[in-house]
């Protein structure tokens, strides 16, 4: 048999000999889908967030949910046995308010199309707030809140049409709930834009500013973003130059991760927040008998045709339509093999589409 040749992994998926809470000095943690899931608890979240803090890692809870004031977030975390302080919360509402200070005078009147989280963030930045276009606000800040209705959306449109600057806390089209995906702030912003004809300034994820502002408040020099949603959490982190840990307790599943374009790829993968307190094996490229495999831990994977193959388990397929169940290092190996292949396809100007079944990662 030909001698295997090994090289390091591309920069997309990396390893760490230390637990991530030791390798990085501040975690920028998403909330829903990471620390909790609506009204439900996320397994292993509390123990590992609290353990990361105990190990000396700073924590910043960075969320696109603009409806909650910081103390409300702290109370929600406490109900899930996660210790936090209001000063550690950085929301999309706070991001929008900070961004607004770069465009309008301090103390200006701002119309709020949103709830307590947006009002509190604006007051903390020294703005006056109103819900009436007749008060001639210089800006409209729009963030999701269940109380936002036709009348309040219309006040925003009146003010924008009169010359007010429109700022959106985030552009998430949907909001995950226990019943499925509901209207998110981005969908309501789209209604206002459709009526006003004017595009807003936007904060929150996936824009990098929310991460850079949160990091500035938290301190630290080696940040790690933690999130469940590829197209917001990890797009924003990558744009900000911050490595990311993806967990499978929220929106984006294993198949989404394996098929992710370069702009959405995390640096580390785990099923849950145990990934904060564990080392991560380094992916290694292995050339064996003219074939390229990617090894992570004791698992190796490669692209085979339009699908994927695990060295010890064969092709990743399930003709009956059910999910293929794999362990954590197999998942990591499949991801880095798929990413390496996709990048090569893009460089050649060819399609990078894999035919994959639903994939379930077995908890370690």
Image (spheres, helix red, strand yellow):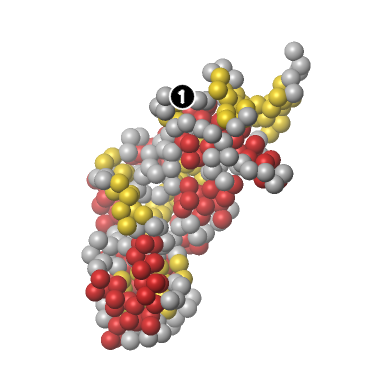
- In-front residue for pair 169/251: 251
Seen in the picture, residue 345 relative to 294 is either above or below; the reply is below
**Horizontally, is 362 left or right of 316 in the view?**
left
Q: Is residue 178 visible?
A: yes
Outermost top residue? 1
Q: Position of residue 322 (x, y in %)?
A: 40, 27
Q: Position of residue 185 (x, y in %)?
A: 35, 62
From the viewer's side, name the closer residue of 295 and 68. 295
Quadrant where the image shows the N terminus: top right
> At x 45% / y 67%, what residue is drawn?
202
Q: Position of residue 44 (x, y in %)?
A: 35, 34
Residue 272 placement, left or right of 4:
left
Give the residue drawn at x 65%, y 26%: 293
Q: Quadrant of residue 62?
A: bottom left
Q: Is residue 303 above or below residue 98?
A: above
Instruction: State the image quarter where residue 172 is shown.
Output: bottom left
| In this rendering, position of residue 250 left or right of residue 74 | right
User: Eyeballing the image, is 69 above or below 136?
Assistant: above
Other-residue count near label 1 (Cα within 10 Å), few / some / many at <14 / 14–19 / ≥20 = few
Residue appearing at x 52%, y 59% in the figure: 208
Residue ranking furthest to the right: 2
- Left or right, 145 with reference to 262: left
Residue matched to label 1: 319
Residue 227 x/y as whole percent: 44, 46
Residue located at (32% from left, 81% from top): 158
Residue 243 shows in this picture: no
Quadrant where the image shows the C terminus: top left
Secondary structure at badge 1 equals loop
**Residue pushed farthest front?**
319
């Amino acid at each position: 048999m030909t001698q295997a040749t090994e090289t390091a992994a591309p920069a997309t998926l990396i390893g760490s000999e230390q637990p991530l809470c030791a390798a990085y000095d501040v975690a920028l943690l998403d909330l829903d889908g990471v620390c909790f899931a609506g009204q439900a608890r996320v397994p292993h979240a509390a123990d590992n967030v609290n353990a990361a803090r105990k190990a000396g890692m700073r924590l910043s809870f960075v969320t696109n949910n603009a409806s909650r004031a910081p103390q409300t977030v702290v109370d929600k975390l406490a109900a899930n046995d996660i210790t936090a302080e209001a000063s550690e919360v950085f929301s999309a509402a706070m991001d929008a308010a900070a961004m607004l200070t770069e465009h309008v005078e301090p103390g200006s009147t701002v119309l709020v199309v949103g709830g307590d989280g947006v009002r509190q963030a604006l007051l903390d930045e020294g703005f006056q707030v109103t819900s009436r276009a007749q008060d001639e606000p210089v800006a409209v800040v729009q963030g999701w809140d269940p109380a936002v209705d036709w009348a309040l959306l219309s006040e925003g449109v009146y003010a924008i049409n009169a010359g007010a600057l429109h700022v959106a806390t985030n552009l998430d089209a949907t909001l995950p709930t226990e019943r499925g995906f509901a209207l998110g702030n981005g969908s309501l912003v789209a209604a206002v834009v459709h009526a006003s004809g004017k595009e807003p300034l936007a904060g929150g994820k996936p824009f990098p500013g929310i991460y850079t502002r949160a990091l500035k408040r938290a301190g630290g020099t080696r940040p790690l973003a933690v999130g469940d949603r590829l197209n917001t959490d990890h797009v924003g982190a990558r744009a900000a130059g911050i490595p990311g840990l993806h967990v499978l307790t929220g929106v984006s599943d294993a198949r989404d991760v394996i098929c992710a374009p370069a702009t959405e790829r995390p640096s580390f993968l785990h099923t849950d927040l145990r990934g904060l307190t564990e080392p991560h094996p380094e992916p290694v490229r292995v050339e064996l008998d003219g074939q390229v495999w990617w090894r992570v831990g004791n698992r190796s994977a490669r692209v085979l045709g339009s699908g994927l193959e695990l060295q010890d388990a064969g092709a990743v397929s399930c003709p009956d339509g059910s999910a293929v169940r794999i362990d954590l290092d197999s998942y990591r190996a499949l991801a880095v093999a798929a990413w390496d292949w996709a990048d090569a396809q893009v460089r050649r100007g060819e399609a990078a589409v894999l035919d994959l079944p639903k994939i379930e990662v077995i908890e370690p």
